[in-house]
């Protein structure tokens, strides 16, 4: 049974930094593309960043240069370091696993089958 458990997040003022983390279990973590998605109130969930098994990353244009996704395959952890945060970054952040091992790795929700319960990030202006 695939389980994804997020932690971190919280509240910060604009310009500040936060880190959200995720632990994956119930599957071979090192074989899967992983990603972060977010959903703000009244908006659809959107892809933020992905990282493939070889460490290749993709980012949404809105977070490029500010967010960094990383993974530790020995610890089964996925992190998202968020710097220079803006109020528009406020959302629930979800860790996600691609539906199958291998293949392309980019932040299209249809490619991801498993999501965590989410962790709240609030950025005050």
Image: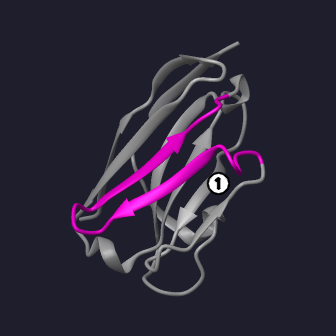
125 drawn magenta: no
Q: Secondary structure at mark 1?
A: strand
State the residue lying farthest toward the bottom: 103
Of residues 107 and 65, which is closer to you in this image?
65
Residue at 22% across / 67% down in the picture? 74
Residue at 45% across / 58% down in the picture? 70
Residue 27's x, y, as percent? 25, 72
Q: Quadrant of the C terminus?
A: top right
Left/right of residue 85 with respect to residue 71 in the rendered view: right
Of residues 52 and 83, which is closer to you in this image?
83
Residue tagged 1: 47
Q: What sort of colour scheme is used for the picture? A: one colour
Residue 56's x, y, as percent? 55, 74
Q: State which quadrant residue 31 falls in.
A: bottom left
Give the total of numbered labels: 1
- Image position of 1 with respect to 10: above or below: below
Magenta stretch bounds: 62-85
Residue at 58% across / 23% down in the picture? 16
Residue 36's x, y, as percent? 53, 52
Could one spot residue 117 in this view of the protein?
no
64 drawn magenta: yes
Could one spot residue 46 in this view of the protein?
yes
Left/right of residue 67 with respect to residue 26 in the rendered view: right
- Image position of 117 with respect to 32: above or below: above
Residue 42's x, y, as percent? 71, 30
Crowd class of label 1 (few under 14; some 14 to 19; many from 20; radius 10 Å) = many
Residue at 60% across / 82% down in the picture? 104
Q: Quadrant of the N terminus?
A: bottom left
- Image position of 39 with respect to 55: above or below: above
């Amino acid at each position: 049974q695939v389980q994804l458990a997020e932690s971190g997040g919280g509240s910060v003022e604009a310009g500040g930094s936060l880190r959200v983390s995720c632990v994956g279990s119930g599957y071979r973590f090192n074989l899967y593309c992983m990603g972060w998605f977010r959903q703000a109130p009244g908006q659809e969930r959107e892809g933020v960043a992905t990282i493939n098994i070889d460490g290749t990353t993709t980012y949404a244009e809105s977070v490029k240069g500010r967010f960094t996704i990383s993974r530790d395959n020995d610890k089964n952890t996925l992190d998202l370091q968020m710097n220079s945060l803006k109020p528009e970054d406020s959302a629930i952040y979800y860790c996600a696993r691609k539906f199958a091992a291998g293949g392309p790795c980019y932040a299209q929700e249809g490619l991801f089958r498993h999501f965590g319960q989410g962790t709240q990030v609030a950025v005050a202006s």
